[in-house]
Image (cartoon, grey):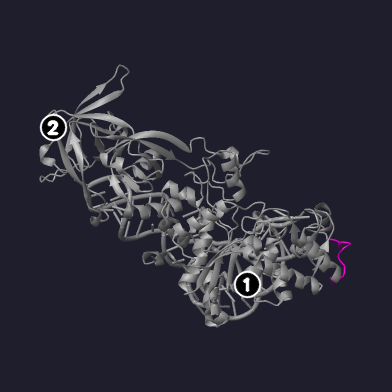
Amino acid sequence: MSDSKETYKGSNFIRNIIIKDLEEGKNEGRVHTRFPPEPNGYLHIGHAKSICLNFGMAEEFGGKCNLRFDDTNPLKEDTEYVESIRRDVKWLGFDWEDREYFASDYFGKFYEYAVQLVKDGYAYVDDLTAEEIRQYRGSLTEAGKESPFRNRSAEENLGLLERMRKGEFKDGEKVLRAKIDMSSPNINMRDPVIYRIAHAEHHNTGGEWCIYPMYDFAHGLEDSIEGITHSLCTLEFEDHRPLYDWFLEKLGVYHPQQIEFARLNLTNTVMSKRKLLKLVQDKYVNGWDDPRMPTIAGLRRRGFTPESIRMFTDIIGVSKSNSIIEYSLLENCLRDDLNKRAHRRMAVLDPLKMVIVNYPEGQEELLEAENNPENEADGKRMIPFGRELYIEREDFMENPPKKYFRLSPGGEIRLKHAYYVKCVDVIKDADGNVTEVHCTYDPASRGGWTEDGRKVKGTSHWVSAKHAVKCEVRMYDNLFTKENPDDVEEGKDFTANINPESLKITECWGEPALAEAVEFTSFQFMRQGYFVADPDTTKEKPVFNRTVSLKDSWAKEQQKS
RNA sequence: AGGGGUAUAGCCAAAUGGUAAGGCAGCAGUUUUUGGUACUGUGUAUUGUAGGUUCGAAUCCUUCUACCCCUGCCA
């Protein structure tokens, strides 16, 4: 799974650290990572970066990578998300074998740790309200002040904690806090809450608990419990690290090494779970797997392949500087992969009728076409040809500009896999719009080639009018018009930048084989782009999503003038 | 003087004191039965700024600047 992929992998600071650790014999030569999502939303391309990094490092150094659900907040989590996360990680091509864990597996252990902290005088039960705790915390520039409940005895705290656990208090009535330093310049160290009361059903533990650990308490400890050697996380947790270190040290347990890296940002894309949730809930898109979403499920439905996403994460590298990757780089990786694998088909999106005037009426023939010029093993198929065809409207111009080498009056082009045709007449309607082009074909050019070495520069795709199947085509574009979707006027949010033309539903006329397309199969519609059969597809009504267009140097050429 | 980070070409990014890799984009070509693909060539980078140390600095020291993150009983 990693031959050509290797060439994209550059050096990065995390790999360098691991190599050094290995050389120094740390962790008995083990490399053990983990991917720790909270099951409160669908995974997106940013998570893919983390997944590829964590599983990739483990694989590269003969180590292991756990899948662990960080489900410490029952109010936000759901098994629907657990299932989608499993599916997405698997689809990306990674295997956590039997190492699927949940933070909730460790609730008992966390509680013991909390008791130990209380006994050792490192944690206390606080009666302050949430609002009061906030006020007592101080600000970025001012120290906080200590809670009046901060100096309760260990015995009293122990009793209170036990009663919290038994459900004797209401939500928010009390919390357990770490006793650290209310004047620390690092706000995370100002006696952070480590347990809160929530009489809520947990997706995994049901009604067993009514107190739940905070992420900051759980995270370092679960890594410790699992024997994680390299705990890779994003930059915003950098100043939480001293807190994790504090718990680990006070509890005297195994200490994983946390290394922070920069999140992935993409142009014309929002990545935060909050914003993605809003897009789904407010119906700006049709669900988490809408092909315009940067979710793994969305990308999959759009026609992305796991290989292309992995190639992308290899190419972009890993560092600590905030960066924004051009979306086109992702598309490039996709094209690169699909070019090698997608079978070619012909489909006409904007049809113009072509009549081959010297082709006998009623005659039909089958012409041979390779499925993929990049791979002979993909075989061939037969395509019906007849007197009446459809070609792409933009492949004909009555008064062509310079450098245009498609069809024009008197000109000759090649119909891909078929014949050379010469335009002999143009039919128009009353308004002067071209409705048909009449051509003659050269029978000696069968297959799209002649022995006389004649130069025919233009090649058009086509479809037999009689045999073509009508398909629905969903043309997707960026969901946001601006590179930075958050670039909005005062008082507006990112939804103001949603591209009103991010989805255009239209139809195309495809060669007959397209009616048989199986969902999630990608094709290159020749000279157009890559398209994938949507799950909505049926034999009666095939449905394709445009994954990405082909590069179009002619369009670029035209833009210059 | 709150704390923590980051600055290398349009976008990423390597280089750990030895004289600035690579990819993408752009530009110019070659090949081509996809204006696709493939291939070739192509960048005066004052390495954010100003100093310093050194035979030698993107790397070490100091100054300044810009940007990102942190005041959830979210993760």
Question: Which is more N-terminal, label 1 or label 2?
Answer: 1
Residue A233, above or below A529: below
Q: Chain of mark 2?
A: A
Give the percent coordinates (x, y) of residue A88: 48, 55
Magenta-colored stretch includes residue A206: no
Residue A250 visible, this orientation: yes
Query: In this image, A428 relative to A499: left or right?
Result: left
- Say which residue appears at 58% left-offset and 51% top-offset: A41
Q: Nearer the viewer, residue A7 or B21?
A: A7
* Residue type, numbered disc 1: Ile
- Circle 1: is it few (<14), some (14-19), or many (20+) Cα within 10 Å? some
Question: Magenta region's main secondary structure?
Answer: loop
Q: CA distance from mark 2 to mark 1?
A: 75 Å
* Residue type, numbered disc 2: Gln
- Circle 2: is it few (<14), some (14-19), or many (20+) Cα within 10 Å? few
Q: Nearer the viewer, residue A196 or A299?
A: A196
What's the mark number on residue A363? 2
